[in-house]
Image (tube, grey):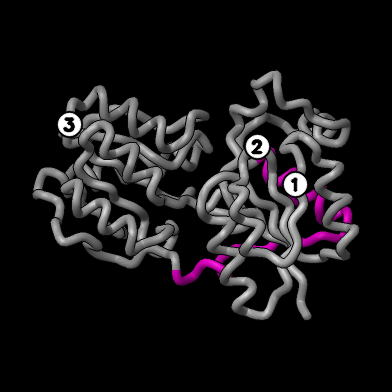
Amino acid sequence: MKKLGLIAGKGELPIAIADEARSQGYTVVAVGLEPLADKSLSSHVDQIHWVNVGKFGKLIDTLKKYEISEAVMAGKVSKTLLYKSKITPDFRAVRLLMSVKNRSDDSVLLSIADELAREGITLLDITPFSAALLAPVGVLTKDAPSDQEWKDIAFGWNVAKEMGRLDIGQTVVVKNQAVMAVEAIEGTDEAIKRGGILAGKDAVVVKVSKPNQDMRFDVPAVGSDTIKAMKSVHARVLAVEANKCLVLNKDVILDEAGDAGISIVGYAA
């Protein structure tokens, strides 16, 4: 039987990936990154080992112990952890961080992929395990954006793509064709809250993939936490890049969005 390593960060995506991989006949061996990965992941995989997010050497040793030659990364691992004293990186993690040209997402993640490859572990594109989660083109909710909101989506799209190209973030919050917030190290949900407060209400949130997005990692995704953040600041529209952004627990978040008067759009320029 085929084996797949799952390096699991925060959020709902690791569970969705695990379920799909097992339905395809894989034995899934997960490395749950503490304190990020959801403990309920254990019931969705065949084996799980919990490793502190700073212990990169232990992560590799665990995958090699189970003779894993192919793995996927799923779930958010925020770079804010690099600046929190409670996370103590091991020697291998320190060496990796010292070797990168900068601490942008792409630089760090590409270095991780290269280090795994040197150990005989190939990091796979997650698309074969997440195709059903990709946002389709069109309005996904009952309510559609207004004419002004469509203009904000188009405006925000161009800004978000440029931020992605610069490897700053993948989400922007706009209103009346003005930028309220750009996602940076704080992550999507906090950017939504910050931008939504500045907008007052009825903000438009646009989330895109990076140009030349590497589908092995940092794939844009939205879920219940995204809707919760939008509801907290009375944001009105969520536009995600069609066929490039994952929508987790789609039926649930569409119901949640509908109840809150939020429109969700799969957008393609």
Crowd class of label 3 (few under 14; some 14 to 19; many from 20; radius 10 Å): some
Which residue occupies 57% across, 49% down?
75
Q: Which residue is mark 3?
A: 201
Q: Which residue is mark 2?
A: 35
- Residue 25, x across and y down, in percent: 67, 80
Q: Secondary structure at mark 2?
A: loop
- Judging depth in this view, the residue of 34 and 196 nearest the camera is 34
The part of the chain drawn in magenta is 107-132
Mark 2: amino acid: Pro
Q: Which residue is mark 1?
A: 50
- Residue 241, x across and y down, in percent: 37, 56
- Residue 115, x across and y down, in percent: 82, 48
Question: Could you tell me how many numbered marks the image carries?
Answer: 3
Which residue occupies 29% across, 50% down?
239
The earlier-in-sequence mark between 3 and 1 is 1
Q: Secondary structure at mark 1?
A: strand
In the image, which is nearer the foreground, mark 3 or mark 1? Answer: 1
- Judging depth in this view, the residue of 90 and 163 nearest the camera is 90
Residue furthest to the left: 147
Say if the magenta span includes residue 160: no
As drawn, 228 above or below 212: above
In the image, which is nearer the foreground, mark 3 or mark 2? Answer: 2
Measured Cα–Cα span from mark 3 to mark 1:
41 Å
Mark 1: amino acid: Trp
Mark 3: amino acid: Lys
